[in-house]
Image (cartoon, rainbow, N blue to C red):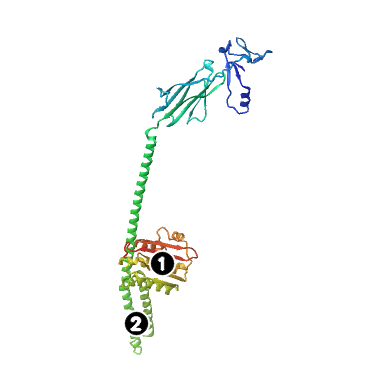
Amino acid sequence: MSSNRGIYRTSKRELNQFAEGKLSSITSVAYGKTDGMLSEECNGGMWPAGTRARDGKLWFPTQDGVAVIDPGTVQINPQPPPVVIEAALIDRAPARTDEALKISPGKENLEIAYTALSFIHPEQIRFRYKLEGLDSAWVDAGERRTAYYSHLPPGTYTFRVIARNSDGVWNRTGKSLVIEVLAPFYRTWGFIVLEILTLAALIAAAVRYRLSQLHREQALQKAFSQRLIASQESERQRIAAELHDSLGQRLVVINNLALFSMRAGKSKSGDKSGLDEDAIGAFEEISAETTQAIQETREISYNLRPFQLDRLGLTKAVEGILRSVAAASGIQIASQLDNIDDIFAEDLRINFYRIVQESLNNMMRHAQATEAEVRIAREPERMILLIRDNGIGFAPASRSTRMGKSGMGKSGFGLAGMSERAHLLGGSFRVRSAPGEGTELIVEFQLGGRGLV
């Protein structure tokens, strides 16, 4: 093929493979003045660009006459050119190439000069190079004899360069150079491990600090809950005493006066100075209402602070509330109670009593139960409270949701309150329930714990 830059020879097979998409480039051999042409600029256009004579020679018109090529006498150089890496520059400073090339941290620009040794058309030698570890494919450098790299990441690379001669014969072995880019200290494995360990230590310290904060918050919350419950019980005890000793006694006096006046009026009914029937009826009504008020006052006082707890002990107080619930609700309650009067400190017994009381109140109001079992079992190392019913049950999660964030139910502290009281006594609180399967409450105390014998 002729052109303004000489005559070129290529493989018809490569042309077909390139047309089929099997090759991405074509190897060609150029002929110019060094091959005997007087001018590299060939003529074409309106005139024939070349012709083949009867003897097989090819004639090409040029600016300075006709160039004749005999394809039968064309010599092909079968010897691949030896490749040499001549020099390397790191930030324009020379570096040795007879050993692995090391690039210190802070050095960025790398230049590698290479060449191929051939006396036959050396200007037509072509090169390809690749930096293994960075380049995914060969870089077609053409006639260029220098490779440029900048900002290489830390790591180990291998620079490879190959060349072909003017007749398209490649030296596939080429030449190679190992390049090691040293990482700065903050990118070394030792420093990275140190960073990871430091980060892990900081995270651990933050976690410990957060856990200590949570423990302090839990301790403060528990202390606050304990003071709140103690304050409530103290106020209940005070109100119960006021109702019993003050209001209750005054109601008894009023009732006695009404009874006395009613009896006196009846005894003098024949005397004109006596009371008439309307007055006697009024005194009877006053006496009945006063009696009802006394009964209600006693019930309120008992609910606020059961007198059995202080007079008879914790076991009798629990037995008393079981009898009251069974009588008021009609639930058949089977009980088995070991004596626990000496387990809790005197100021803490009310918490255990409230757990039983709140559980029985929930049973009466919500469970729709007909049978129940209450068992207090005292063992050498633990004490267990079990309250079980055959009611409608519930999903504990939904009950907790209805109780709200404060843990307060409509009837008081509810499950959250019972759990809080159990924890204040050093016990564990568990509830097992499901819709239609009843409810089972278990509170377990390890003897010898907080406030326990």
| Mark carried by residue 386 | 1
Tag 2 secondary structure: helix
Q: Nearer the viewer, residue 126 or 371?
A: 126
Residue at the location (36% across, 46% down)? Answer: 204
Q: Is residue 219 above or below residue 148?
A: below
Report the residue at 35% width, 44% height from top.
Answer: 201
Quadrant for residue 332, please give it: bottom left
Amino acid type assigned to the residue bearing label 2 in the image: Leu
Quarter of the picture containing the N terminus is top right
In-image side of 393 versus 15 (left or right): left
Return the residue at label 2.
Answer: 259
Residue 188, by quadrant, is top left
Quadrant where the image shows the C terminus: bottom left
Question: Could you classify mark 2 by the number of other residues whose Cα lies within 10 Å: few (under 14), some (14-19), or many (20 or more)?
Answer: some
Left or right, residue 281 beside residue 13: left
Tag 1's secondary structure?
strand
Tell me the kind of residue under disc 1.
Leu
Instruction: Work out whether residue 452 or residue 180 is closer to the camera in this orientation and state it.
Output: 180
> Looking at the picture, how far across and down is residue 334, in whole percent?
43, 72
- Of badges 1 and 2, the one in the foreground is 1
Q: Are marks 1 and 2 in contact (CB under 8 Å)?
A: no
